[in-house]
Amino acid sequence: MIIKPYEEIYRDDLIFMVLQAKDALGRRPTINKDLLDIKANYFDRGDMFWVAINEEDRVIGCIGFSKTENPSEAFLHRLYVKSSEKRKGIGAQLLLTAENSMRSQGISVSLVHLGSPMEQWFESYSFYPKHGYEEYKPGYMRKEL
């Protein structure tokens, strides 16, 4: 598995993987509009987005971040791992990639909005605290980088 910056050739595979991930969680599989144009919604704004690719060159995970108005903070977005690939450390590697990139850009606080209701986002509420994130208001976590 390798993690690399998103490329347009992975667009359809990324969308398919996200829809599958949502379906596996029992959520209605809808696509977030920002994923329809990663270049415009991330790269053109100076933000980042990565995909995790398996040996068959298929998307098995993703993550992105966008800076806030505060230059020392950024929000994580769209951390998904294909359901058949979970519990293999892929999510942790994607998170570390994003955090390292944020640090290199002078960002010292990583933020994440977990979604509600909590029951639909139970994996996020479990995952992020394991990686040093703490809730600072309902549905939001942060980590000092």
Image: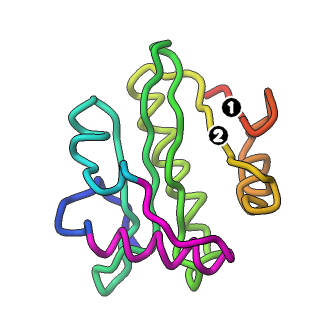
Q: Nearer the viewer, residue 45 or 27?
A: 27
140 with respect to 58 (left or right): right
Task: Find disc 1 in the rendering and name its residue.
Answer: 143
Q: Is residue 14 magenta?
A: yes
Where the C terminus falls, by quadrant?
A: top right
Q: Nearer the viewer, residue 96 or 21?
A: 21
As drawn, 10 above or below 137: below
Are there few (<14), some (14-19), or many (20+) residues within 10 Å of tag 2?
some
Q: Is residue 65 magenta?
A: no
Where the N terminus falls, by quadrant?
A: bottom left
Residue at image position (21%, 34%) is 44
Residue 141 x, y percent position in the rendering: 72, 35
Are there few (<14), some (14-19), or many (20+) residues within 10 Å of tag 1?
some
What type is the residue that disc 1 sits on? Lys
What type is the residue that disc 2 sits on? His
As drawn, 84 above or below 4: below
Q: Distance between the Cα atoms at labels 2 and 1?
A: 12 Å
Residue 99 x, y percent position in the rendering: 52, 39
Q: Please say if the residues under marks 2 and 1 sit with CB atoms less than 8 Å apart.
A: no
Q: Nearer the viewer, residue 126 or 21?
A: 21
Q: Nearer the viewer, residue 3 or 125?
A: 125
Which callout, 2 or 1, points at the residue further toward the start of the chain?
2
State which region is magenta.
12-32
Task: Find disc 2 in the rendering and name its residue.
Answer: 113
Specify the quadrant of the image occupied by residue 53. bottom left
The local secondary structure at tag 1 comes to strand
The rendered magenta stretch, by its main secondary structure, is classed as helix
Q: Which label lies toward us, 2 or 1?
A: 2
Q: Check residue 118 in the rendering and tell me which mark sits there, or answer none.
A: none
Residue at image position (62%, 80%) is 24
